[in-house]
Amino acid sequence: MSTLYVVATPIGNIGDISLRALHLLGLADAVACEDTRNTAQLMTRYGLSKTLIAAHQHNEREVADKLIARLHAGERIALVSDAGTPAISDPGARIVEAVRAAGLRVLPLPGASAGIAALSASGLQDAQFYFVGFLPAKGKQRETVLGSLRGIAATLVFYEAPHRIVDAVDALTAAFEPTRQIVFARELTKLFEEIHRCDLAQAAAWVKADLHREKGEYVVLLAGAPAAIAADEVEADRVLRILLAECS
Ligand code: SAM
């Protein structure tokens, strides 16, 4: 039956792909992928050869139309990104939205996602988490976003690009209480995998202590707001809303 399958692929260790994902990639009529070279390597590793269609952040809308035409013709299409789960800080959401809007079936094939992997091995005890993904690169915008997260009583989950980890930690240090716990989940499932937990006050020193730590892929987890701060933020928000209502 014509379906778009959203297929998770490994975030490092090539073995982290489900049997069902491999079966589906074998059955699919075509694979829409963020970077055809990366996906070609994965397919070759598992002895698969399929038509690959480039579907990245700059062409998602056009590709969605092509995929919809193929699905209307009865095809099964797999959608993958370079690593982990498509549409999670990766291209794919626009395609999924368009395919659904066309009344066609979209199903997930679950698997690796860096944020969930990091949370599972962090030992942080907040019952809830809040997925932030990538912070804005520009300082002012980043400060605004971080300010809006101060009162959230759930573990904050950040993705960070390798070359920005030092800046990001400095920004977190400036924005949050020094006693909050932070967890660095670096190069998960890869050769130099490392998971480190400390107080935010020690975070910058840990990252800067070893040049290798300024590289690599990171998920950064920050413990949620202590109860008193969360309550203060809620109260401040309530007062602001009343004032805004009176001004309008
Ligand atoms: N779609 C992916 C997922 O499901 O996790 C995320 C893709 S996003 C473009 C890439 C970011 O995910 C990296 O910059 C890093 O923050 C995080 N990431 C991906 N692989 C990772 C790994 N092996 N270890 C730590 N973080 C990783």
Image: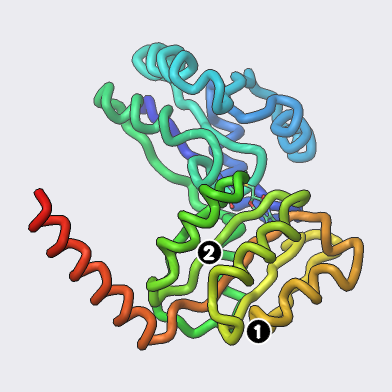
Q: Earlier in the sequence, mark 2 or mark 1?
A: 2
Instruction: Quadrant for residue 56, please give it.
Output: top right
Does 191 sit left or right of 61 as displayed? right
Q: Residue 42, image x and y in percent?
A: 73, 38
* SS for dot 2: strand
* Number of marks: 2
Q: Can residue 19 be seen in this view?
A: no
Q: Mark 1 falls on what kind of element?
A: strand
- Determine which residue is flagged by label 1: 199
Tell me: 153 left or right of 142. Answer: left
Residue projecting furthest to the front:
247
Residue 150 appears in view: yes
Q: Which of marks 2 and 1 is in front?
A: 1
| Residue that badge 2 annotates | 157
Q: Label 1 near label 2: C-beta < 8 Å?
A: no
Along the horizontal axis of the image, is 107 left or right of 38? left
Q: Which residue is located at x 61 percent, y 58 percent? A: 114
